[in-house]
Image: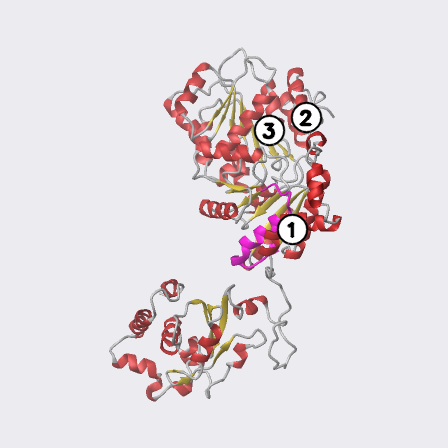
Amino acid sequence: MTFEELGVREDLLKAIKEMGYETPMPVQEKVIPHLLNEDSDVVALAQTGTGKTAAFGLPVLQRIDVSRKVPQALIISPTRELCLQIGGDLADYSKYIDGLKVLPVYGGSSIESQIRALRGGVQIIVATPGRLLDLIKRGTVNLQDVHTVILDEADEMLNMGFVDDINDILTHVPEERKMLMFSATMPPEIAKIAARFMHNPQEYVIGTRNEGAENVRHIYYLVHARDKYLALKRIADYNPAIYGIIFCRTRRETQEIADKLIVDGYNADSLHGDLSQAQRDAVMKKFRERNLQLLVATDVAARGLDVSDLTHVINYGLPDDVATYTHRSGRTGRAGKTGVSVSIVHSREKGKIKDIEKRIGKQFELREVPTPERIIERQLYNLADRIEKVKVNEDVINNYIPGIQKKLEWLSGEDLIKRVLSLEFNRLLEYYKDAPKLDIVTEKKGKEKGSKKHKSGAEMSQEEKDRRTGEPGYDRVYVNVGKSDGFFASDLIGLINETVQGQRIEVGRIDLMSGYSLFDVRKGDGRRVADALRNSDFYGKRIYSEIADLNKDYAAENRGKGGGKYDSKSEGRRRDRRGKGGIDRRTRRDQERGFSKREARSERGKAAKKERPEGMHGNYDKFMKKKR
């Protein structure tokens, strides 16, 4: 099948042939003949990158009467980027059609210049809903001669809340018009729009409903939320030739991730709604020209970015809507090429993977985050490949060879290779020295029935291991008092202030468990703190403290420890701490001072905060604020 056989006119054939179009894509084979020869409306379900613009653009251009300088076709898109993209494509297709004018109409650009262009006469308007409604209300655009209306990315317009705007716009076009709706997915709301506004629409499905692009592999990495950025950098380092979009959920997160990547030396930039139109245009231009390798973007901002050679789409967080994931992943693997959709997932997002798999009909691959060894090996081979393929200007370089050769003649070939590689990779080797694994390892839980044996480090879940492991640069310390003893962050700070002498102690992460607590202190302070706390007293309970050990199951060790059992009827408070009336000593003391339980806790927090040295324990205020 050829475009000529589909009925495309000669002047259009000439233009698309120069653009590299050879054979029609499936959506074009189905939609183009229908629009040229049939009267019924069309609903086309096709993924991003399947050739939708040419599918509706070529027949629309062919049906325009260039002798009439009035709007005859209206194309509505959700974003200004997509609006500009469609307008540019139509201008390219109509290169050899004299007198045909296409006008992109969108917010963020001068409305006065758009009004002047409309008054000069245009046949095709490509518009975002908001700006088009503004022009209609001003009386500067007349849609009474429009014979074709196209809704592109209809599901995205639904997500962005444009349904009412579209309803309003459609009241200004003739009832007898041809209407086309293109969408990557078909949620029920889109079906309702089709039923309400379209006349006996013919539905064309390219692939399967809500299915992802066929040439895209879907993989995910399971890491802790705090390690997501580190995992992102390793993925980028493991793919030296990466050219991709990193999708974030919010504008703020988008800018933060882009800023971090730039500071860390990556060729990256951001694209989101807080940028001016000039800034957005500059970023997209750099990305299209491959002056950027990584573009960090929100879903809305990236809608109009039509780039055909992306190697990767990276989901820094999974979207709530499966259709959004489908849009994201559909940006790679276009035009018969393969692509990779990567998701960096933390434990709470793992359930979303199953939902997406069911909807797109594809299996995700769980991968191990690239280790430093694998990254360095990959980078070295990439450098070797670049050296092998580099273009050498013999005429110029030969002038310098004798002098360089004389200077380096004492080096063997092997020595020379080592030095070239070290020159390029010393920074990378230093950065990844002693770098930890980032993956959350899912392991089988439980022990044989009746076994009383404590878990070893190898048998513990990753969550348990993390609880017993300090953050980088910190020691993890264990104490044998917890929430069931009435022990809270304020008590821990007060105890450290009372018992640890000398230089102030900076406390990091605190995990308060039922019968014990774990907390971080700066590397090197752990032993001093543990020794000072050991044998101190917390309302009659003797404190034991040590550097946290992965091979100890502290929950099991603390059950029943301290000469008493837990009383479940009193929220775990120990019977041996209770006196007359079932009230523990600290509560009795607070009552004697005239404090209620809440007031007492507040007073203890104030006292501990007042006693601690200036600047101590940066996380304390956040912790107490969250608790309150």
Q: Earlier in the sequence, mark 3 or mark 2?
A: 2
Tag nearer the camera, 2 or 1: 1
Q: Is residue 441 visible?
A: yes
Tag nearer the camera, 3 or 2: 2
Residue name at image x 63 percent, y 50 percent? 425
For disc 1, the marked residue is 422
For disc 2, the marked residue is 21
State the separation of the CA atoms marked 3 and 1.
49 Å
Label drawn at residue 53: 3
Residue type, mark 1 in image: Ser
Q: Nearer the viewer, residue 388 or 291?
A: 388
Total labels: the figure holds 3
Q: Is residue 358 visible?
A: no
Q: Is residue 225 magenta?
A: yes
Image quadrant where one finds the C terminus: bottom left
Q: Nearer the viewer, residue 587 or 415?
A: 415
Give the magenta-colored segment's residue range.
Answer: 221-244
Which of the 4 image quadrants contains residue 268?
A: top right
Q: Secondary structure at mark 1?
A: helix
Q: Residue furthest top?
A: 67
Q: Is residue 324 magenta?
A: no
When the figure is inspected, residue 109 is found, relative to residue 390, above or below; the finding is above
Image location of residue 214, percent across then percent down: 68, 41
